[in-house]
């Protein structure tokens, strides 16, 4: 995709593939996929702040925590000090 533009998800292909594979839970698979995308986008927008993300999503922080766990999403923050010293 163009810089600053996101790739468009191929929903038609997703549904077709799942139908061909004999999915018996297509609705939930699609809901999970869109939830994962939206939650990830919102969390990136608020730099991982769960309180702000929950407010934007219109859900409680507890619901967000459950959704993160159920969708296999983790918020990771890395902190390091660059003090110019080499590791020994």
Image (spheres, rainbow, N blue to C red):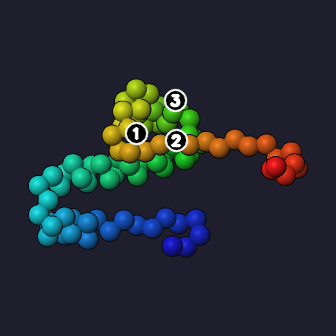
Q: Which residue is mark 1?
A: 68
Dot 2 falls on a residue whose secondary structure is loop
Q: Which residue is mark 3?
A: 51
Dot 3 falls on a residue whose secondary structure is helix
As rendered, which of 5 and 70 lies closer to the eye?
Answer: 70
Q: Which residue is mark 2?
A: 75
Query: Can you give x and y, in whole percent of width and height, for residue 43 in the image?
Result: 51, 43
Q: Report the residue at 43% width, 45% height from top.
A: 73
| Other-residue count near label 3 (Cα within 10 Å), few / some / many at <14 / 14–19 / ≥20 | some
Sequence-first disc among 2 and 3 = 3
In the shown orientation, is residue 16 left or right of residue 80? Answer: left
Does the CB distance between marks 2 and 1 fall below 8 Å? yes
Q: Report the residue at 32% width, 68% height from top.
A: 10
In the shown orientation, is residue 43 left or right of residue 65? Answer: right
Q: Report the residue at 55% width, 73% height from top.
A: 2
**58 lies above or below 77:** above
Query: Can you give x and y, in whole percent of width and height, for residue 76 in the image?
Result: 56, 43
Query: Can you give x and y, in whole percent of width and height, for residue 1 in the image?
Result: 51, 73
| Other-residue count near label 1 (Cα within 10 Å), few / some / many at <14 / 14–19 / ≥20 | some
**What's the distance in space between the residues labelled 3 and 1, CA to CA?**
13 Å
- Quadrant assignment, res 60: top left
Sequence-first disc among 3 and 1 = 3
- Nearer the observer: mark 3 or 1; the answer is 1
């Amino acid at each position: 995709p163009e810089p600053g533009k996101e790739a468009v998800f191929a929903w038609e292909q997703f549904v077709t593939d799942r139908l061909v594979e004999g999915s018996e839970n297509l609705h939930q698979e699609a809901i999970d996929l869109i939830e994962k995308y939206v939650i990830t986008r919102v969390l990136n927008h608020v730099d991982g702040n769960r309180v702000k993300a929950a407010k934007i999503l219109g859900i409680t922080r507890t619901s967000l925590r459950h959704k993160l766990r159920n969708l296999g999403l983790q918020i990771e923050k890395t902190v390091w000090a660059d003090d110019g010293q080499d590791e020994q």
